[in-house]
Image (tube, rainbow, N blue to C red):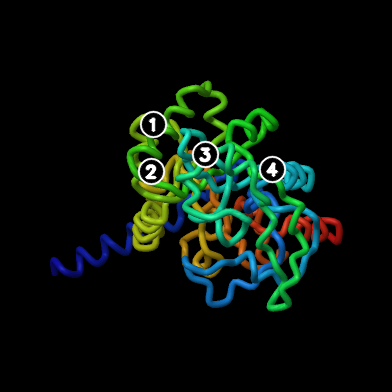
């Protein structure tokens, strides 16, 4: 008899949870432009060791990722936020550049974080980009002096928002990063969010509790809990006050996807984005009207898609 009572109680709870009124969506989804603007790239079989600069499938525009012109154009095309890669340098600055080393994309050599900002400024940021196996270098000599510092970016775009992927860890890098954050006002910091290495995110939150951060580890903890208990309308604390970046194939198994999941996230201070950086823009997975933002590498495709509606 006890077992039947427990089962009945659980069933009633499920029915009550399912009958709860839907939450109102507060805002439509936003757009994050991946590295400003990138060229179409073949990512098949890519690992952490792969040089993607020599895997371009075509050159669709004159912009080089992670540079001021690319950032500016991304905002012109409608990006709400621009994603950038950041390294602490040997002279305690923060450089905007993708790779751990310089050999793939530039005419320089060595570990990025062991160089000075002055040296990085002397390099050609477009040197290593080539299309397929043709050994054609369409961006060579067009990126000299274009590797910017984070200070330059924030100065040029004082009212814009950025998602920073910190690529270097360790006490020295974290010290450089937090030193820079201390120089910003609370309002300036509110336009910056972070993703990437878990230890970096933890240190940022410890010193700046209001700062939005995201890491794969946080995402896993959040979403695993939500998958098991999201049906009850419970929203895990690990999913709150953060930027949730969700792989495209993963969203459909989340309770209330897309609109109710987005509404719950927004009610708890979070923004949700669908990760679509390794393929052309697809209107079928553009869920901004349902509250899910788009993390895309194809701002031109997104713009053309909006025109065709």
* Tag in front: 3 or 2: 3
Question: Given contact means CB atoms under 8 Å apart, are the residues at marks 3 and 1 in contact?
Answer: no
| Image quadrant where one finds the N terminus | bottom left
Q: Earlier in the sequence, mark 2 or mark 4?
A: 4
**Secondary structure category for the residue under label 3:** loop
Q: Earlier in the sequence, mark 3 or mark 1?
A: 3
| Image quadrant where one finds the C terminus | bottom right
- The residues bearing labels 3 and 2 have C-alpha atoms spaced at a distance of 21 Å
Which residue is depicted at the point 59% across and 37% down? 118
Q: Earlier in the sequence, mark 4 or mark 3?
A: 3
Question: Given contact means CB atoms under 8 Å apart, are the residues at marks 3 and 2 in contact?
Answer: no
Which residue is depicted at the point 38% across and 51% down? 218
Question: Measured along the vertical axis of the image, is residue 5 above or below residue 176?
Answer: below
Please give the residue where the numbered disc 3 appears in the rendered image.
Answer: 116
**Secondary structure category for the residue under label 2:** helix
Could you tell whether 49 is left or right of 282 in the image? left
Please give the residue where the numbered disc 1 appears in the rendered image.
Answer: 209
Please give the residue where the numbered disc 2 appears in the rendered image.
Answer: 200
Quarter-of-image position of residue 102? bottom right
In percent of width and height, residue 277 lies at 62, 61
- The residues bearing labels 2 and 4 have C-alpha atoms spaced at a distance of 28 Å
* Tag in front: 3 or 1: 3
Q: Earlier in the sequence, mark 3 or mark 2?
A: 3
Q: Determine which of the numbered discs, if any, sits on residue 122 in the image.
A: none
- The residues bearing labels 3 and 1 have C-alpha atoms spaced at a distance of 30 Å
Q: Earlier in the sequence, mark 2 or mark 1?
A: 2
Question: Given contact means CB atoms under 8 Å apart, are the residues at marks 2 and 4 in contact?
Answer: no
Which residue is depicted at the point 86% across and 61% down? 308
**Secondary structure category for the residue under label 4:** loop
Please give the residue where the numbered disc 4 appears in the rendered image.
Answer: 145
């Amino acid at each position: 008899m006890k077992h039947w009572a427990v089962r009945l109680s659980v069933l009633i709870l499920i029915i009550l949870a399912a009958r709860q009124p839907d939450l109102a969506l507060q805002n439509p989804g936003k757009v994050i432009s991946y590295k400003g603007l990138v060229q179409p790239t073949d990512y098949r079989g890519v690992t952490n060791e792969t040089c993607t600069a020599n895997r371009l499938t075509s050159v669709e525009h004159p912009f080089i990722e992670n540079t001021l012109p690319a950032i500016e154009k991304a905002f012109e095309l409608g990006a709400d936020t621009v994603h950038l890669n950041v390294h602490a340098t040997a002279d305690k600055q923060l450089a905007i550049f993708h790779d751990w080393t310089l050999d793939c994309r530039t005419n320089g050599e060595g570990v990025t974080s062991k160089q000075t900002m002055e040296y990085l400024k002397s390099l050609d940021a477009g040197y290593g980009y080539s299309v397929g196996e043709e050994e054609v270098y369409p961006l060579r000599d067009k990126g000299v002096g274009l590797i910017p510092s984070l200070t330059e970016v924030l100065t040029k775009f004082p009212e814009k928002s950025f998602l920073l992927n910190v690529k270097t860890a360790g006490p020295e890098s974290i010290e450089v990063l937090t030193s820079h954050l201390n120089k910003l006002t609370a309002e300036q910091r509110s336009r910056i969010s972070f993703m990437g290495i878990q230890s970096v995110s933890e240190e940022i939150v410890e010193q700046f509790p209001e700062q939005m951060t995201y890491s794969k580890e946080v995402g896993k903890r959040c979403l695993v809990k939500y998958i098991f208990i999201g049906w009850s309308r419970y929203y895990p604390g690990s999913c709150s006050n953060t930027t949730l970046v969700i792989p495209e194939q993963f969203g459909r198994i989340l309770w209330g996807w897309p609109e109710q999941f987005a509404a719950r996230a927004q009610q708890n201070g979070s923004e949700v984005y669908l990760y679509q950086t390794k393929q052309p823009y697809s209107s079928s997975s553009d869920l901004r009207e349902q509250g899910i933002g788009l993390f895309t590498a194809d701002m031109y495709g997104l713009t053309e898609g909006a025109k065709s509606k």
